[in-house]
Amino acid sequence: MHKHGHETHIHAHSHTHGLRREGNKRSLTIALVITFGIMVAEALGGWLTNSLALLSDAGHMLSDTGSLALSLVAVWLAAKPASPSKSYGYYRFEILAALFNGLALFAIAVVIMWEAYGRFMDTPAVNSGPMMLIAFIGLAANLASAWVLLRQGDVKGNINLRSAYLHMISDALGAVGAILAGFFMYQFGWYIADPIISVVVSLMILKGAWSVVRQSVHILMEGVPSRADIAEITAALAAIDGVTNVHDVHVWTVSSGYDAFSCHLLVRQGFTPSQVLARAVPLLEQRFGIRHTTIQAVDEGTDMGCWGCRGGTCTFAAVQ
């Protein structure tokens, strides 16, 4: 009788994830309240002073209010348990929220540049004194929101939080731009500075937005995480005593901080699949940081080749 083995290895990190999730919720809620309040102030200020830089920043903050709310909903949904129809749960909603936020940044930047183009053709006067005052208030609020997200949220490890943080940083840049434009207009009467600085800020926003959109699409397309090297992982597994080949290797990201791995191993006669698995699973976790693994180990003499191998689509490494 041929032996074969299959093991799904998932570490429980619910306590750590729970703490991070609560920190993300708290930081997003605080940032949402701050952003909404300053958005109203800047919109009124931009309307009263006739400043495009201030109105554009208020428009950006309107988007941020929506994006922060969406990010907050995404964190809440991600905590819902898996179901028979959604075996991974709702983790991916955070990636969808990040993608939407990135696209929203693109749209805002395009609108600002379009408005700036009109002002290049016909530059209006701007009440720069009040404009700078309100922009300073907006800058303080943006930096406070960004600080809260950075200190209490998982900005580095969670793309959803990172997209929200990027919105805050972009707002801060918009406020700095409004302050600079106000200074040039107040000191020198250079009203052209208002649309020029608005375009510069928009280009910076586009750069950050592209990074978020690109990473979100990569995850949704089941792309290999940037920190993972399939060739290196395959070689490490192939080097385990008793392994004759490694194939059907897949590494993908379910959501931020949740990487998954699967593969097939062929085991040399004289070794058991359980012996190989006992070495493969810790290796993946300790060396590559992959904690969610599914490995099928099959005896060398067993005719259980996978369909991917037969179709020539597997990642395959033979041990010499």
Image (cartoon, grey):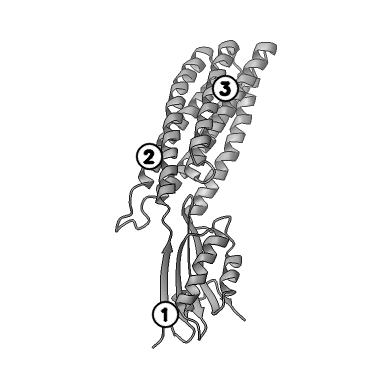
- When the figure is inspected, residue 73 is found, relative to residue 1, above or below; the finding is above
Disc with the residue nearer the chain's start (2 vs 1): 1
Sort mark 3 into few (<14), some (14-19) or many (20+) by Cα contacts within 10 Å. Answer: many
| Mark 2 residue element | helix
* The C terminus lies in quadrant: bottom right
Q: Which of marks 1 and 3 is nearer the N terminus?
A: 1
In the rendered view, tell whether residue 297 sits above or below residue 72: below
Residue 231: image quadrant is bottom right
**Residue 302, located in which quarter of the rendered image?**
bottom left
Q: Mark 3 points at which residue?
A: 53
Amino acid identity at mark 3: Ala
- Distance between the alpha carbons at the discs numbered 2 and 1: 44 Å
Give x and y (percent) for residue 233: 57, 66
Nearest to viewer (mark 2 / mark 1)? 1
Instruction: Name which residue lies at 63% across and 20% down.
Output: 181
Q: Is 22 placed left or right of 176 in the picture?
A: left
In the rendered image, is residue 114 in sight?
A: no
Question: Which residue is situated farthest in the right direction here?
Answer: 188
Q: Residue flagged by tag 1: what amino acid is it? A: His
Of the two numbered discs 1 and 3 in the rendering, the one whose residue sits closer to the viewer? 1
Q: Which of these two is toward me, 39 or 53?
A: 39
Which disc, if any, is residue 159?
none
Q: Nearer the viewer, residue 31 or 103?
A: 31
Is residue 110 or residue 243 the one in the foreground?
243
Is the residue under label 2 in contact with that under label 3 (CB below 8 Å)? Answer: no
What residue would you read off at disc 1?
Answer: 4
User: Closer to the N terminus: mark 3 or mark 2?
Assistant: 3
